[in-house]
Image: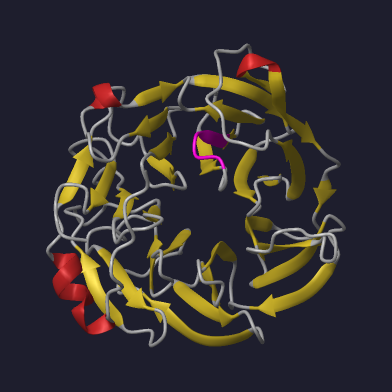
Amino acid sequence: MAPPRRNLLAKERFAFAFGSLKTQSYHDPISRTPGSHTIRTIAWNPTGQLIATGSADRTLRIWNPERAQVKYSTDLRGHTAGIEKVVFNPVRDAELASCSTDGTVRLWDVRSKTCVSRLDVGGEAFTLSWSADGNVMMVGRKDDTLIPISVESPSTPTILADAPVTTQSPKPNGGAPSTYKVLESHPQPIQTNATTFSHHISTPTAPDLQLFATTGDGTVKILSYPSFDVLHTLHAHTSACLSIALAPTGRYLAIGGSDALVSLWDTTDWICRRTVASNNGGAVRGVSWSFDGRFICGACDEVGCGGNGIEIFHAETGESVYTVPTGGGINSGIPTVAWHPSRYWLAYSTTADGPGGGGAGGLKIVGAAGGSL
């Protein structure tokens, strides 16, 4: 069962309540040398009972956040190059997708520890997003090409049996399998970075989805899917837009830029309501919302961005409400952050403390070691 949703925290109480939480560290024994095991991507499953990490050294691991020992985790093997992005199916809590610069997207059943599909996307894949209904994934390649993948799943979540690598994932008792199909690729005319879908669920009267894509010229393209027509262009930053996240409430779209700013856009009129900036500076390569859409923080993997902690902002006012002490040295960075889907827990990764630093980066979760939230 999913953890119960907690009482919402007021801005004035956030620092006291969140600051009382204890942080749990998760050590992967596969990591050997500083820097080689940098965790580039983190994803919670929809219930918040599992968290996936993907690393530069090809390690893909599923952790139980409440049992930090590695024996309670699952090592998923298959990628032959660094893992760039992991994301769970928003409607199937055991179905994980990962993409890599090895040119593949892999689908995993994390209960059976099985790769149920391996898809060749024709180039180095580095971004991945999933539509709200779980029916479409969008892959981004480093050559600025977007590739949709259709996902046809059984109507009810299932525990999948062991299976060979295939484009279908068998359902026990002879039921309908999940089917994954790589669709026509769509080269983009400009550097294209992260993507995310709107929360809209396709209906017969409103079948099209909206896809947001950050670009290298400081804009965000709002595309209609499946046509890929440009519906609107947000002139968001003075330099490249790198990361993007839609609030769980749908009220704001957060855009992280190489100018060290996070801009918050009102989705009703597409006006930028405010910008926030961490004292650490550096390009914002990840943004994440708390489950209630009230608080936001960013990630920066540049040298020096992690030493002063992770700054958390109140979305409605833009005020800095708390800084998570990360324990990193002056040269450390924070490659990725991810709020729990229903609790005020915050997962993040750290890089080693610069050249010759004292250890590999790893996963940490604020709240998992104890606290009342």
Drawn side of residue 137 relative to residue 319, left or right = right
Residue at 20%, 41% in the rendered image: 25
| Residue stretch rendered in magenta on the structure | 92-98
Image side of residue 311 versus residue 261, left or right: left
Residue 301 appears in the figure: no
Q: Is residue 69 above or below residue 195?
A: above
Q: Does residue 55 appear anywhere in the picture?
A: yes
Q: Please provide percent x and percent y for residue 297.
A: 37, 67
Asked if residue 26 is positioned above or below residue 5 in the image, the reply reads above
- The front one of 266 and 58 is 266
Residue nearest the observer in this picture, 240 or 254: 254
Dividing the picture into quarters, in which one does residue 179 lie? top right
Tell me, yes or no, whether the highlighted magenta stretch contains residue 95.
yes
Q: Quadrant of the C terminus?
A: bottom left
Q: Position of residue 23 (x, y in %)?
A: 17, 51
Q: In the image, residue 42 lies at what x, y percent?
A: 42, 45
The residue under the point 38% across, 88% down is 317
Residue located at (47% from left, 27% from top): 110
In which quarter of the view is residue 287 placed? bottom left
Q: Is residue 358 left or right of residue 274?
A: left
